[in-house]
Amino acid sequence: MAEYNDIWEEIKDKVTLVEEMERHGINLIPSGMKRLRCVCPFHADTTPSMIVNKGDVETFKCFGCQVSGSVIDFIQRIKGNISLFKVIQYFKSNYHLEFAQEYDLEKLIQKSTKRRTKNSIAGAMLAISNSVRPFLKNSPSFQEDLMKIKPYLRAIDEAAYVENMSFIQSNFIKLQKEIKKIKEIRKQIA
Ligand SMILES: [Zn+2]
């Protein structure tokens, strides 16, 4: 079983910040050996206040509004502060990332510490998505089943946004119960 922070490592390894910024229409100007500059997309910037550091790990920092981070922070912000779950989905669909490892929800929650909250939430979201996807895929009544589990998925997504791990956990348990219930009803009908 891989460590949960591998998700972000995998993303950072396969995706470059510079490429993502260009994809989002940001004009990058060379500014030194390993540096680029641009107009900050996160505040009403008139001068190029944002610095992009190239290298093994690419980072950005705006000297106007003080935002900074990696390609993950950039995508989360540029997409309108989307949840980490959606950030993962974005990278998955745009880079065909399969994420080599399976992520174990129980372990993720056990290992959750404040410093690693972001990583463990991302891992938890992936574990949830890995359990929901096959269920929906094999569903003979997809729309109906989706409607039943949607409130839990929404609650989980909102909890991920405010980084509330215990709320993610409690809703995941409810979600599992609902899925189990649906499967049992299906068995009775069959
Ligand atoms: Zn800024």
Image: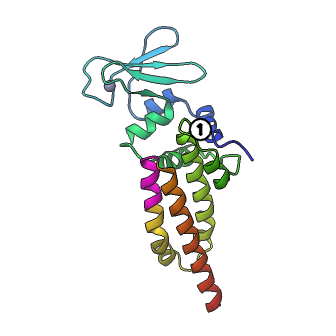
Judged by its main secondary structure, the magenta piece is helix
Q: Who's the residue at 54% across and 47% down the image?
A: 121
Residue at 44% over, 34% down: 74
Specify whether 51 is left or right of 113. Answer: left
Does 70 sit left or right of 137 as displayed?
A: left
Magenta region: which residues? 155-163
Name the residue located 56 percent from the left edge and 65 percent from the top edge.
173
Residue 44, above or below 150: above
The single residue placed furthest to the right in the displayed view is: 1
Residue 169 falls inside the magenta stretch: no
Q: Is residue 162 magenta?
A: yes
Would residue 137 be found to the left or right of residue 27 on screen?
right
* Residue indicated by mark 1: 8
Residue type indicated by callout 1: Trp
- Which of the 4 image quadrants contains residue 180? bottom right
Task: Give how far across and how far down residue 179 sits, in percent.
Answer: 58, 73
The image position of residue 18, as x and y in percent, is: 49, 26
* Outermost residue toward the bottom in this view: 189
